[in-house]
Image (tube, grey):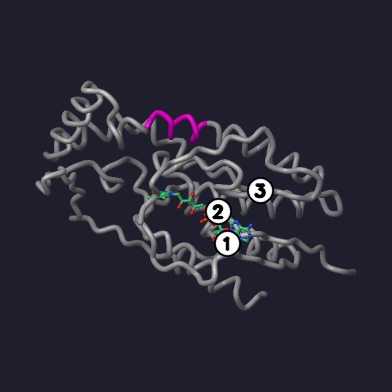
Amino acid sequence: MNKPRALVVGMGIGGLATALRLHDVGWESVLVERAPERRGAGYFVAMFGSGTSAAERLGVLDTIGDRTSPGAITYDVERDGRRRPGMGYGDVPGAPRLLLRGDIESALYNEVAPLADLFDSVHQVVMPSWHTDRVVLVGDSAWCVTLYSGMGASSAIAGADLLGTVLQRNPGNPGRALREWEMRLRPFIATHQELGRQELVTFIPQTRRDKRTRTIMQTLLGNPTGKRVMQRILAPKFRPKAIDVAAA
Ligand SMILES: Cc1cc2nc3c(=O)[nH]c(=O)nc-3n(C[C@H](O)[C@H](O)[C@H](O)COP(=O)(O)OP(=O)(O)OC[C@H]3O[C@@H](n4cnc5c(N)ncnc54)[C@H](O)[C@@H]3O)c2cc1C
């Protein structure tokens, strides 16, 4: 029997993870990429439980590695160059892996290959549907949650993992598979899009009040007791980042 074939457009985290997962479930992928060469290490990203669980199943978690350093300090840099300790992903609950985007992309690329300046604006992508007929969008092209959510890489890899699972579960019926995929993923993505919108003010304070809140948080994080208190306060907000939405 001929293997089902997929055309995967884009070799970022979402595209590569999709090709890898589809290979697992017996599909053949043709990958196309418009960039003339692969990007290097790229910017810093955090990978939460949703992403690490999927990456582990895809067999790339060890290669992705972990650049988390227990003594690392995040600094806020003022316009005049002064810096002071700030809040970073190393301080939040959920123990995310701290990585460079390229760590994830390279690990995926190395698996897939044998088989076959900062943004100047931030846009969240909200689409009424992520698939039509046999065409499906995965990752930022479908639901870009934005860097404020910290879940773009995790959701791209988890979305790809789940895509393979539903295609395997519905052989010969990609329509039903894609409906099932979207139905399961939508509430998860909606949560992270909403959290991303809420987190905007943490990254870029919009009002004096936001700035004051941020300063209080930074002060608290400056000592071990304050940090423990902040982590307890923040824990419920970070729990959705560990949901293994792609678990079979
Ligand atoms: C500053 C910053 C910090 C971030 N921090 C985090 C974080 O802490 N945690 C986290 O999880 N996420 C973070 N993210 C988001 C995360 O990097 C993205 O969500 C993730 O890389 C999305 O992967 P993707 O494959 O969907 O998209 P992309 O990585 O954009 O890949 C898409 C690929 O498709 C190619 N392409 C596009 N159009 C075409 C076409 N027509 N034909 C062929 N190829 C095409 C592109 O060249 C590209 O290679 C951050 C993002 C930024 C900018």
Magenta: predominant secondary structure element? helix
Seen as rendered, the residue at the extreme right is 1
Q: Is residue 192 magenta?
A: yes
- The answer to which of 188 and 7 lies nearer the viewer is 7
Residue under circle 1?
58
Which tag, 1 or 2, sits closer to the chain's start?
A: 1
- Residue 38, placed above or below residue 45: below
Residue under circle 2?
157
Residues in magenta, as a range: 191-199
Which tag, 3 or 1, sits closer to the chain's start?
A: 1
- Residue 56, placed above or below residue 243: below
Q: Nearer the viewer, mark 1 or mark 2?
A: 2
Q: Secondary structure at mark 1?
A: loop
Q: Quadrant of the N terminus?
A: bottom right
Q: Disc 1 vs disc 2: Cβ atoms closer than 8 Å? A: yes
Q: Describe residue 16's horizontal placement relative to residue 46 as left or right.
A: right
Q: Nearer the viewer, mark 3 or mark 1?
A: 3
Q: Position of residue 225 (x, y in %)?
A: 14, 35
For the residues labelled 3 and 2, the Cα–Cα distance comes to 13 Å
Kind of residue at disc 3: Leu
Q: Secondary structure at mark 3?
A: loop
